[in-house]
Image (cartoon, rainbow, N blue to C red):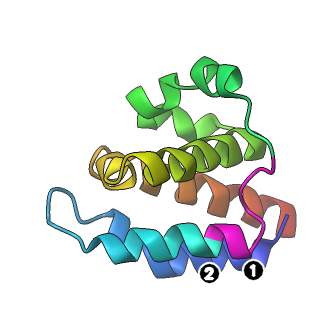
Amino acid sequence: MNTSMNSSLYSRYADLFLQGDKLVCITQFQQFVVELEQNDILLDELNWDEWYEHSHFVDRPEYIADATWYQCLLLLTAMARLEKFSPGVIDNYRRQGVLIAIITRMQSLSMSIAV
Protein backbone atom coordinates (compact mmCIF):
# COMPACT_ATOMS: atom_id res chain seq x y z
CA MET A 1 0.00 0.00 0.00
CA ASN A 2 1.52 3.31 -1.06
CA THR A 3 0.68 5.57 1.88
CA SER A 4 2.43 8.64 0.50
CA MET A 5 0.45 8.37 -2.75
CA ASN A 6 -2.80 8.02 -0.84
CA SER A 7 -2.07 11.13 1.20
CA SER A 8 -1.16 12.92 -1.99
CA LEU A 9 -4.41 11.85 -3.66
CA TYR A 10 -6.41 13.10 -0.73
CA SER A 11 -4.62 16.44 -0.52
CA ARG A 12 -4.90 17.08 -4.27
CA TYR A 13 -8.44 15.92 -4.88
CA ALA A 14 -10.44 16.39 -1.66
CA ASP A 15 -11.43 19.97 -2.53
CA LEU A 16 -12.45 18.93 -6.04
CA PHE A 17 -14.59 16.08 -4.74
CA LEU A 18 -16.30 18.36 -2.22
CA GLN A 19 -17.64 20.76 -4.88
CA GLY A 20 -21.20 19.43 -4.63
CA ASP A 21 -23.32 20.35 -7.63
CA LYS A 22 -20.82 22.93 -8.86
CA LEU A 23 -19.64 22.28 -12.43
CA VAL A 24 -16.15 20.81 -12.59
CA CYS A 25 -13.93 20.50 -15.66
CA ILE A 26 -13.85 16.94 -16.96
CA THR A 27 -10.08 17.09 -17.50
CA GLN A 28 -9.63 17.10 -13.72
CA PHE A 29 -11.36 13.72 -13.52
CA GLN A 30 -9.31 12.45 -16.42
CA GLN A 31 -6.15 13.51 -14.57
CA PHE A 32 -7.38 11.71 -11.45
CA VAL A 33 -7.82 8.47 -13.42
CA VAL A 34 -4.39 8.90 -15.03
CA GLU A 35 -2.81 9.26 -11.57
CA LEU A 36 -4.63 6.17 -10.33
CA GLU A 37 -3.27 4.22 -13.32
CA GLN A 38 0.27 5.60 -13.08
CA ASN A 39 0.50 4.78 -9.39
CA ASP A 40 -0.88 1.25 -9.73
CA ILE A 41 -3.90 2.01 -7.56
CA LEU A 42 -6.36 0.37 -9.94
CA LEU A 43 -6.83 -3.39 -10.01
CA ASP A 44 -5.31 -5.24 -12.97
CA GLU A 45 -8.35 -7.48 -13.26
CA LEU A 46 -11.93 -6.49 -12.57
CA ASN A 47 -14.60 -9.05 -11.84
CA TRP A 48 -17.83 -7.26 -12.76
CA ASP A 49 -19.89 -9.68 -10.67
CA GLU A 50 -17.83 -8.64 -7.67
CA TRP A 51 -18.45 -5.00 -8.56
CA TYR A 52 -22.20 -5.61 -8.56
CA GLU A 53 -21.93 -7.35 -5.18
CA HIS A 54 -20.33 -4.16 -3.80
CA SER A 55 -22.42 -1.61 -5.70
CA HIS A 56 -24.37 -0.84 -2.53
CA PHE A 57 -21.40 1.38 -1.62
CA VAL A 58 -22.24 3.79 -4.42
CA ASP A 59 -25.87 3.89 -3.36
CA ARG A 60 -24.93 4.58 0.27
CA PRO A 61 -21.55 6.38 0.41
CA GLU A 62 -21.67 6.39 4.20
CA TYR A 63 -21.00 2.63 4.06
CA ILE A 64 -17.60 3.35 2.51
CA ALA A 65 -16.37 4.44 5.94
CA ASP A 66 -16.17 0.71 6.77
CA ALA A 67 -14.86 -0.48 3.39
CA THR A 68 -11.68 -2.49 3.10
CA TRP A 69 -8.70 -1.37 1.07
CA TYR A 70 -9.62 -3.89 -1.61
CA GLN A 71 -13.21 -2.64 -1.77
CA CYS A 72 -11.95 0.91 -2.31
CA LEU A 73 -9.72 -0.30 -5.14
CA LEU A 74 -12.61 -2.26 -6.61
CA LEU A 75 -14.84 0.82 -6.61
CA LEU A 76 -12.18 3.07 -8.14
CA THR A 77 -11.30 0.51 -10.80
CA ALA A 78 -14.92 0.05 -11.83
CA MET A 79 -15.50 3.82 -11.94
CA ALA A 80 -12.40 4.39 -14.05
CA ARG A 81 -13.47 1.71 -16.52
CA LEU A 82 -17.06 2.93 -16.64
CA GLU A 83 -15.82 6.49 -17.25
CA LYS A 84 -14.05 5.36 -20.44
CA PHE A 85 -17.33 4.10 -21.90
CA SER A 86 -19.64 6.65 -20.37
CA PRO A 87 -17.99 10.01 -19.68
CA GLY A 88 -19.54 11.70 -16.68
CA VAL A 89 -19.71 8.63 -14.44
CA ILE A 90 -16.95 9.89 -12.17
CA ASP A 91 -18.51 13.33 -11.93
CA ASN A 92 -21.81 11.73 -10.99
CA TYR A 93 -20.12 9.74 -8.22
CA ARG A 94 -18.40 12.94 -7.09
CA ARG A 95 -21.75 14.70 -6.79
CA GLN A 96 -23.16 11.77 -4.80
CA GLY A 97 -20.26 11.93 -2.32
CA VAL A 98 -18.81 8.57 -3.35
CA LEU A 99 -15.37 9.79 -4.43
CA ILE A 100 -14.70 11.85 -1.32
CA ALA A 101 -15.84 8.90 0.79
CA ILE A 102 -13.39 6.59 -1.02
CA ILE A 103 -10.34 8.83 -0.79
CA THR A 104 -11.20 9.67 2.83
CA ARG A 105 -11.40 5.97 3.65
CA MET A 106 -8.15 5.26 1.82
CA GLN A 107 -6.50 8.10 3.72
CA SER A 108 -7.79 6.65 6.99
CA LEU A 109 -6.60 3.14 6.15
CA SER A 110 -3.20 4.46 5.08
CA MET A 111 -2.80 6.42 8.29
CA SER A 112 -3.69 3.42 10.46
CA ILE A 113 -1.07 1.29 8.68
CA ALA A 114 1.59 4.01 8.83
CA VAL A 115 1.28 4.31 12.61
Q: Position of residue 44 (x, y in %)?
A: 81, 51
The N terminus - image quarter = bottom right
Amino acid tagged 1: Ser
Residue at point 49%, 81% (across, down): 12
Q: Disc 2 versus disc 1: distance between alpha carbons?
A: 6 Å
Residue at the (24%, 66%) spot, across then down: 19
Residue at point 63%, 28% (across, down)? 51
| Most foreground residue, 59 or 51 | 51
Expressed as whole percent of the image width and height from the top left, the position of residue 37 reads: 68, 68
The reply to whether the magenta stretch includes residue 39 is yes
Tell me which secondary structure the magenta stretch mostly adopts.
Answer: loop
Q: Is 75 inside the magenta-drawn segment?
A: no
Q: Is residue 55 above or below residue 105?
A: above
Q: Position of residue 30 (x, y in %)?
A: 45, 71
Q: Amino acid at mark 2?
A: Ser
Task: Return the residue found at the far left.
Answer: 22
Report the disc number at residue 98.
none
Quadrant in the rendering for residue 111: bottom right
Residue 109 lies left or right of residue 20; in this view the side is right
- Give the extent of the magenta segment: 36-44
Local SS, label 1: helix
The residue lying at 41 percent from left, 68 percent from top is: 29
- Residue named by callout 2: 8
- Look at the picture and state if 42 lies above or below 48: below
Q: Assign the C terminus to one quadrant of the image.
A: bottom right
Quickly name the residue at label 1: 4
Q: Mark 2 and 1 residues: CB-CB less than 8 Å, in contact?
A: yes
